[in-house]
Image: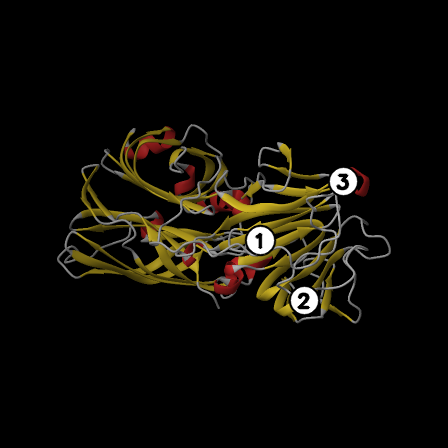
């Protein structure tokens, strides 16, 4: 149990935040459809399997899109557009859109090299904080409809220095790195050479490639020759000039009742906040851990193997609740097995286990963490439970936890306020947490006030996660857009615990 002591827990957290193996999200729903592909245009899935793209093909989260001597255009399900020039590469890190579920919006792309033209769809309008194009040198955000960008790497652009070149098209874009942030207005261009380099305003708008000669209005996204004509012949290379604007936006998806869309994670290494209850007298184990995560086809965590002590495992055949959104996964077991040091603490039989996990590939970059000042709101949770004698004796309702989390890592302060109903009364947890470790994304509640509207806290309710705290968790996502936590405390009902997931509040 080396990770449950004050001396070794920081090392565990440091491990989970610096895992070298990145794992993108699992195969999920279609994110975008290819409306044009010509030449050497391919997509590679997370396993590295390539497929040539043609008009009508779908691409998904985790795909890497590459044009060598080719080019492609894609229309996302929210109406957004992305065009790749020759010798370009873009990865779809995470994408989700439902017309009646704006809380699940996300469009996170990783721009790896080349030239792109982009126009935002519904996500870029109603959830601007969840539309990002990341790169090694800067992040592009939106307060408008789109623009074009070129990323030159390893001397790949003749007569031009390496770095990101960004030109605004309509309304306002933003370009940000560790050095600062700048608005990019229509017709303005910026150049950024590295993550810590200044953001330099250019006097002359650079051409993305020779093929790009002019910038059409935002709603007219085709360049002449970029659409395959139906009567094209091999003699003209499969292309005929097509007037800009012929690509029509798809109709708005039909409305319907709000529904949570589960986007499973891939198997791989990642951080975990876990609260487990067993049958031994101690009957409880909680920690911020790092290890190998295995999920079933429904996206539920079914196995956790400690990264540095592989004999320490949790295996859960008894999944009671589970959900995932492509960035985090959370759930509740009502049966399972523990091995190694875990078993010596709580027994080999698990009566209940709450988890919140992520993949190492979703870690928030260090420069952003060091300056992070973000408020979050709870948007999902497992059912709060009370455990006695190693078994669940009271169970609440899924997604019933409400509250906020305020993370200011720049000032080393974290605060939280949670509330949830259980057994005919409402519990409240209010307090402060500490960043843990100094350079990590984790936090532990250092002081908490736990109350209930009934008699469960007639005698003091006290925290039981590591070191007597009531909450533990971590921030994750490419732009720190998610936070997850598990909570645990003693009460008159038994040991109360649960998992809660937060999303960033647009600033």
Query: Residue 235 is drawn in which quadrant?
Result: top right
| Residue 15 visible in rendering | no
Provide the residue designation for mark 3: 233
Q: Which residue lies furthest to the left in this view?
A: 455
Residue under pointer 1: 365
| Cβ atoms under marks 1 and 2 closer than 8 Å | no
Front label number (3 vs 1)? 3
Q: What element carries label 3?
A: loop
Look at 44% across and 52% down and name the residue there: 474
Q: Say what secondary structure mark 2 lies in.
A: strand
Residue at image coords 58%, 54%: 366
Which quarter of the figure has residue 163?
bottom right
Does residue 108 show up? Answer: yes
Residue at 82% x, 55% y is 210
- Residues at circles 2 and 3 in contact by the CB criterion of under 8 Å: no
Q: Which mark is residue 168?
A: 2
Can you give x and y, in whole percent of width and height, for residue 393 in the image? Answer: 17, 42
Measuring from the top left, give residue 276's x and y in whole percent: 31, 39
Where residue 486 appears, as percent x and y from the top left, is 35, 49
The mark that comes first in sequence, 1 or 2, is 2
Residue 331, x across and y down, in percent: 34, 42
In space, the residues marked 2 and 3 are separated at their CA atoms by 36 Å
Mark 2 neighbour density, 10 Å: few (under 14) some (14–19) many (20 or more): many
């Amino acid at each position: 149990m080396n990770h449950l002591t004050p001396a070794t827990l920081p090392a565990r957290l440091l491990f989970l935040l610096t895992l070298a193996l990145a794992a993108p999200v699992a195969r999920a729903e279609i994110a975008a459809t290819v409306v044009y592909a010509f030449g050497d245009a391919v997509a590679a899935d997370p396993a590295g399997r390539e497929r040539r793209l043609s008009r009508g093909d779908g691409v998904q989260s985790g795909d890497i899109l590459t044009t060598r001597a080719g080019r492609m255009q894609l229309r996302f399900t929210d109406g957004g557009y992305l065009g790749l020039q020759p010798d370009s590469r873009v990865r779809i890190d995470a994408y989700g859109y439902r017309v009646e579920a704006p809380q699940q919006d996300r469009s996170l792309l990783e721009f790896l090299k080349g030239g792109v033209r982009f126009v935002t769809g519904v996500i870029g309008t109603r959830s601007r904080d969840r539309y990002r194009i990341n790169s090694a040198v800067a992040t592009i955000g939106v307060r408008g409809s789109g623009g074009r960008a070129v990323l030159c790497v390893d001397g790949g652009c003749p007569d031009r220095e390496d770095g990101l070149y960004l030109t605004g098209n309509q309304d306002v874009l933003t370009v940000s790195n560790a050095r600062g942030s700048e608005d990019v207005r229509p017709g303005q261009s910026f150049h950024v050479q590295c993550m810590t380099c200044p953001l330099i305003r250019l006097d002359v708008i650079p051409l993305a490639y020779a093929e790009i000669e002019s910038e059409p209005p935002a709603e007219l996204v085709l360049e002449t020759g970029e659409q395959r004509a139906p009567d094209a012949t091999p003699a003209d290379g499969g292309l005929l000039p097509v007037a800009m604007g012929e690509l029509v936006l798809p109709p708005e998806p039909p409305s319907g009742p709000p529904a949570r869309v589960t986007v499973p994670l891939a198997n791989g290494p990642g951080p975990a906040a876990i609260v487990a209850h067993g049958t031994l007298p101690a009957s409880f184990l909680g920690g911020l851990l790092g290890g190998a995560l295995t999920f079933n086809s429904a996206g539920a965590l079914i196995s956790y193997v400690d990264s540095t002590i592989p004999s320490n495992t949790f295996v859960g055949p008894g999944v009671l609740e589970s959900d995932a959104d492509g960035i985090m996964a959370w759930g509740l077991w009502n049966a399972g097995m523990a091995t190694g040091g875990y078993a010596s603490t709580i027994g080999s039989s698990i009566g209940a286990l709450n988890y919140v996990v992520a993949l190492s590939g979703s870690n928030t970059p260090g420069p952003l963490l060091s300056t992070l000042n973000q408020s979050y709101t709870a948007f999902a949770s497992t059912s709060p439970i009370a455990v006695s004698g190693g078994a669940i004796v009271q169970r609440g309702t899924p997604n019933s936890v409400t509250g906020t989390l305020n993370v200011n890592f720049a000032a080393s302060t974290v605060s939280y306020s949670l509330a949830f109903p259980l057994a005919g009364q409402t519990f409240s947890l209010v307090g402060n947490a500490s960043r843990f470790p100094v350079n990590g994304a984790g936090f532990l509640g250092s002081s908490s006030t736990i109350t209930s509207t009934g008699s469960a806290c007639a005698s003091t309710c006290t925290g039981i996660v590591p070191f007597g705290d009531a909450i533990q968790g971590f921030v994750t996502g490419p732009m720190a857009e998610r936070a997850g936590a598990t909570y645990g405390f003693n009460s008159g009902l038994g040991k109360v615990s649960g998992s809660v997931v937060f999303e960033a509040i647009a600033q």
